[in-house]
Amino acid sequence: MNRTLAPKVKESLLSRWEPLYRSRLHYLVTWSTRGRRPVLRERHITAFETLIQQACDERGYSLLEVAAGSDHAHVLIGLRPAQSISSVVRELKGKSGMALLTQHPELRVWLRGNLVWDERYAVETVSPARVDKVRERLHNFHAHPNQLAEAS
């Protein structure tokens, strides 16, 4: 019996162990502005996309696509099985809403209050085979008119 392997195994067990996830769950999350008011302009949408990207990078979420209109937002996100979609949505909506109100105080006036987002949201699961189609649909739906003209 070869006992020289035992110390290497023991050292590897003492280090931090994290499970390797081979599966990823994909979700399309949609939420709207408070009262479904069309208050988001191009500068707000650009700031929102940046905020969502930063929040996902900080927390280790896999952001696949983010798109927004004047009165709603879509986020296509991939999560590990141990991550809760409700917690992720609560964090994304909270951080982005507070940051948007701080960066753009006119939203507080236009929405008549201290909340940017409505309480409700919709979550749709997306199979790995359909992720690219959903990304394309979001991109086409929220593309600028000049981008659509260039594509045709």
Image (cartoon, rainbow, N blue to C red):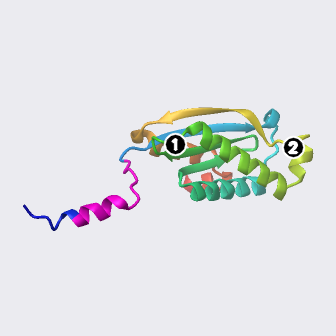
Give the magenta range: 7-21
Q: Which quadrant of the rendered structure holds the N terminus? A: bottom left
Quarter-of-image position of residue 47 = bottom right
Q: Which residue is mark 2?
A: 114
- As drawn, the label of residue 83 is 1
Q: In what element is the residue under mark 1?
A: loop
Q: What x and y, as percent, mark residue 122?
A: 63, 32
Q: Please state the horizontal and vertical placement of residue 8, each as a whole percent of the image.
A: 24, 66
Comparing labels 2 and 1, the label whose residue is closer to the camera? 1
Residue at position x 54%, y 51% from top?
61
Q: Earlier in the sequence, mark 2 or mark 1?
A: 1
In this rendering, would 126 be left or right of 32? left
Q: Residue at x 49, y 45 (%)?
A: 79
Q: Is residue 142 rendered magenta in the image?
A: no
Of residues 72 and 51, the one nearer the viewer is: 51
- Please report the residue visible at 58 percent of the width from the left and 54 percent of the height from the top: 59
Q: Real-space Cα distance between discs 2 and 1?
A: 29 Å
